[in-house]
Amino acid sequence: MSTVTFPALKETEDKIAAKRKELGGIVAEAKGDGMELDLKRVKSIKGTTHDIAAHMAALNDELTDLSKERDTHLATLKAAQKMLSSDDKYADGAESTYDLGPESDSGRPHVKSVGQLFTESDAYRLKKGPIGPEANLPVNIKTLLTTTAGWDPEETRTGRLVDFATRPLQVAQVMPTNTTTQSAVQYMEETTFTNAAAETAEGGTYPEAALAFTEQTVVVRKIPVFIPVTDEQLEDEPRIRGVIDNRLPFMIRQRLDSQLLVGNGTAPNLRGILNVVGIQTVAKGTDPTPDAIYKAIVLVETTGQAVADTAVINPLDWQDIRLLRTADGIYIWGNPADPGPERIWGLRVVRAQALTQNTGLVGDFGNYSELVVRSGIDVQVSNSHSTFFVEGKQAIRADMRVAAVWYRPTAFATVTGI
């Protein structure tokens, strides 16, 4: 396998480490022996407390910019490595992608949605006509049709549908995605690494090293959902297309988003990162929350030998961090008039409502997590469910099959008690 090196990435990571160290030193000075931050204690920076706060804000802004630069370098490096290590599947210019979110402006060719493909398909069009396995003959009879559980057509209605207030997608977007044609994802893990390399005199015996590998398996799981709809509602093509395009796929993605964090791993559940054996943990104790998060970052770096790229925090816990102030009332994360950075110690912050409050998570998602898709969201419709045929109903179902793979548990650490 060819290896790509990227000196710019190492240079950027060194700059991040230096800035973090400088900012951490200022915080340590301000904290002194107690827990209250007092910028008057800082001696390493000349000027007033406002000057010191401005310097800290500037350091944090530099960390934010450097972290974004590192993310760009990582994406470039991974793309190059993937092209060098792939087989012939890209030789003819074909592209295979799976996107958990809405369509983007990435320049990819426009792909029809599953709802559009369904409503334009022969199966749907022939069903509405006088031919096909479910022929609908236009016979004039007196029949009372009710739409009490659906949308009653009305010319004066605006057509706008206000979605139910529910948790948005938050976590799945930070995980790299891949595809598989198997029912499980298998990979090899190096479980023993004994480095016996040592200086040896001429004629001496070479020291013996040891390596051992273990095959790991992650089973693909299915996340399904269905909605019953009357035949009358199916005739309202824009409406049924909207249901298929938006709500059913969203329900599946929302469930997936939660499983990636708290799934217990017992079939048919996925195993979320919080239930993976071997992840590290840091208790906040009497430390300020930013200190505890930084300690988790260091654990990932020293024990996990990884570089944390994301901090996942419950919105209520992020609120407490965002509102932190110095002893003289200066907001550490920026003036309330400013949008403020969604970063902490240079890491991007993902506010996840599915994460248990008072528990934070940091980790190297980019290198040691992967969402492997066996089949993307598949939508089907039938009246063969239960007594739907004689009741004039259709069952619209959607499902996807995925596996959540956590390659190195020690590359992740929780922060408890925040």
Image: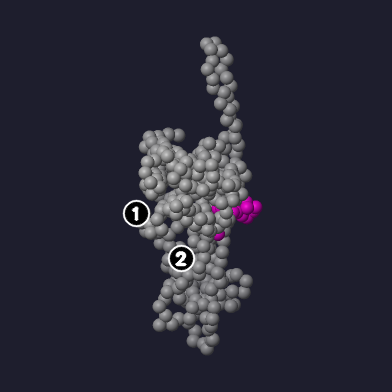
Q: Is residue 172 visible?
A: no
- Precedes in sequence: disc 1 or disc 2: 1
Q: Which residue is drawn at 38% across and 59% down?
A: 337
Residue 258 counted in the magenta span: yes
Residue 21, image x, y percentages:
45, 38
Spot occupied by residue 373 in the image (x, y as percentages of width and height):
51, 52
Q: Is residue 40 something that shows in the picture?
A: yes
Q: In the picture provided, is 57 more to the left or to the right than 274?
A: left
Position of residue 350 measured from the top left corner of the image (x, y, whole percent): 48, 53
Q: Which of 366 and 412 is in front in this view?
A: 412
Residue 219 is inside the magenta segment: no
Q: What residue type is labelled 1?
A: Gly
> Which mark, residue 305?
none
Instruction: Residue 405: give x, y in percent of width and height.
Output: 55, 47
Q: How crowded is mark 2: few (under 14 residues within 10 Å), some or many (20 or more)?
A: some
Q: Residue at x 44, y 54 (%)?
A: 329
Q: Which residue is drawn at 51% across and 55% down?
A: 320
Please, which colouring scheme is shown?
one colour
The crowding category of the residue bearing disc 1, from other C-alpha atoms within 10 Å (few below 14, some 14 to 19, many at least 20), is few
Which residue is more in the foreground, 309 or 248?
A: 309
Q: Residue 107 carries which label?
A: 1
Question: Helix, strand or loop at disc 2?
Answer: helix
Mark identifier at residue 245: 2
When asked about the image quadrant of residue 238, the answer is bottom left
399 over 92 or under it: above or below: below
The magenta stretch is: 255-269
In this orientation, which residue lies closer to the viewer: 53 or 344? 53
The three-letter code of the residue at mark 2 reads: Asp
Q: Distance between the residues labelled 1 and 2?
A: 21 Å
* Residue ID at (49%, 74%): 234
